[in-house]
Image (spheres, rainbow, N blue to C red):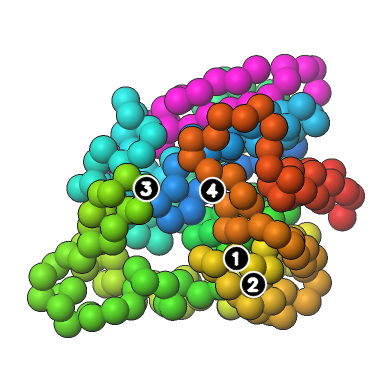
């Protein structure tokens, strides 16, 4: 079963659009929730083909758009709502992740009987890896954490650095999206929110408090997030598993759109290793 563009409505908050992939059986399945990265979205590239593989191995796979990623309910792909994108921040993404998990394992979810609430894995790609790590460190419902090409520090990202005085004065700064050619706005609130919650948003501290099985997957030649960041994550949690990939980039050699029925070799390795890690008893 595949259900696309389901909507989680929330009071006084933007809705969350999500997809579920599962095989309907009488047995509840481990839940896997995937968090996309910066300038990402649930329908990017090969993520649907990735989701199908998780489904085919007996997992209940969910991917969703962060509520302020720039997509909408009617147009979840790309970034038609740049006003929402401008108002995004890390704490909103953490709240989104909390809300989607809470909904999925609740009686409000008509598919909850398909989910084994004792087995919840969070996967995060890039910035989503940082969000997943922080969430896993503070939420005992989560039983496994896997990051793909994750950042190790939010304070070093372009979103929270640069000419702060000019950003504060203008109230907004722009980042060019190389693919869509959109000038994507970041309102100054992003920085203020980061500073207000800096202790919570410390990925190093979160990593050091991870007590569940933790896998870190990263390409050695990642041009966007250095492999050194993966090594930092591993150093902060020596019990974690670090898997390095050769001949791969930040998105494991996939691209958007992805028109092939097969995954690139690097991404296939990531998926295979991730599924094995999820299915291995702790």
- Pinpoint residue 19: horizontal percent, then vertical percent: 53, 29
Q: Is residue 33 above or below residue 219?
A: above
Q: How crowded is mark 3: few (under 14 residues within 10 Å), some or many (20 or more)?
A: few
Q: Residues within 10 Å of mark 4 (few under 14, many from 20)?
A: many
Gap in angstroms between the C-alphas marked 1 and 3: 18 Å
The quadrant where residue 191 appears: bottom left
- Pinpoint residue 183: horizontal percent, then vertical percent: 23, 54
Q: Is residue 83 left or right of residue 240?
A: left
Which badge, 4 or 1, comes first in the chain's sequence? 4
Q: Are marks 1 and 2 in contact (CB under 8 Å)?
A: yes
- Secondary structure beneath label 4: strand
Gap in angstroms between the C-alphas marked 4 and 2: 20 Å
Residue holding disc 2: 227
Q: Are marks 1 and 3 in contact (CB under 8 Å)?
A: no
Gap in angstroms between the C-alphas marked 4 and 1: 19 Å
Q: In this view, does 97 lie to the left or right of 189?
A: right
Residue holding disc 4: 35
Which badge, 3 or 2, comes first in the chain's sequence? 3
The numbered disc on residue 179 is: 3
Task: Answer whether residue 55 is magenta in the image.
Answer: no
- Pinpoint residue 145: horizontal percent, then vertical percent: 69, 56
Front tag of 4 and 1:
1
Q: Are marks 4 and 2 in contact (CB under 8 Å)?
A: no
Front tag of 3 and 2:
3
Gap in angstroms between the C-alphas marked 3 and 4: 21 Å
Residue holding disc 1: 222
- Secondary structure beneath label 1: loop
Q: Is residue 180 above or below residue 22?
A: below
- Secondary structure beneath label 3: loop
């Amino acid at each position: 079963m595949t259900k696309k563009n389901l909507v989680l409505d929330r009071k006084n908050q933007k809705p969350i659009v999500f997809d579920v992939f599962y095989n309907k059986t009488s047995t509840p399945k481990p839940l896997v929730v995937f968090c996309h990265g910066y300038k990402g979205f649930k329908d990017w590239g090969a993520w649907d083909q990735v989701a199908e593989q998780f489904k085919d191995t007996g997992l209940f796979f969910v991917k969703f758009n962060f509520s302020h990623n720039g997509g909408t309910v009617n147009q979840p792909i790309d970034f038609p709502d740049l006003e929402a994108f401008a108002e995004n921040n890390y704490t909103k993404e953490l709240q989104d992740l909390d809300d989607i998990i809470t909904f999925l394992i609740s009686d409000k979810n008509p598919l909850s009987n398909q989910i084994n609430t004792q087995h919840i894995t969070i996967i995060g790609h890039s910035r989503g890896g940082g969000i997943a790590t922080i969430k896993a460190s503070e939420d005992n419902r989560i039983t496994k954490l896997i990051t793909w090409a994750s950042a190790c520090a939010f304070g070093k990202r372009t979103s929270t650095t640069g000419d702060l005085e000019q950003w504060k004065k203008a109230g907004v700064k722009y980042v060019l999206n190389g693919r869509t050619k959109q000038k994507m706005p970041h309102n100054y609130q992003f920085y203020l929110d980061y500073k207000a919650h800096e202790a919570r948003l410390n990925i190093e501290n979160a990593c050091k408090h991870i007590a569940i099985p933790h896998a870190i997957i990263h390409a050695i030649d990642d041009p966007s997030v250095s492999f050194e960041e993966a090594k930092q994550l591993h150093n902060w949690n020596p019990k974690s598993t670090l898997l390095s990939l050769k001949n791969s980039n930040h998105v494991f050699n996939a691209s958007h759109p992805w028109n092939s029925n097969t995954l690139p070799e690097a991404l296939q390795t990531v998926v295979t290793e991730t599924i094995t890690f999820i299915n291995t008893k702790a």
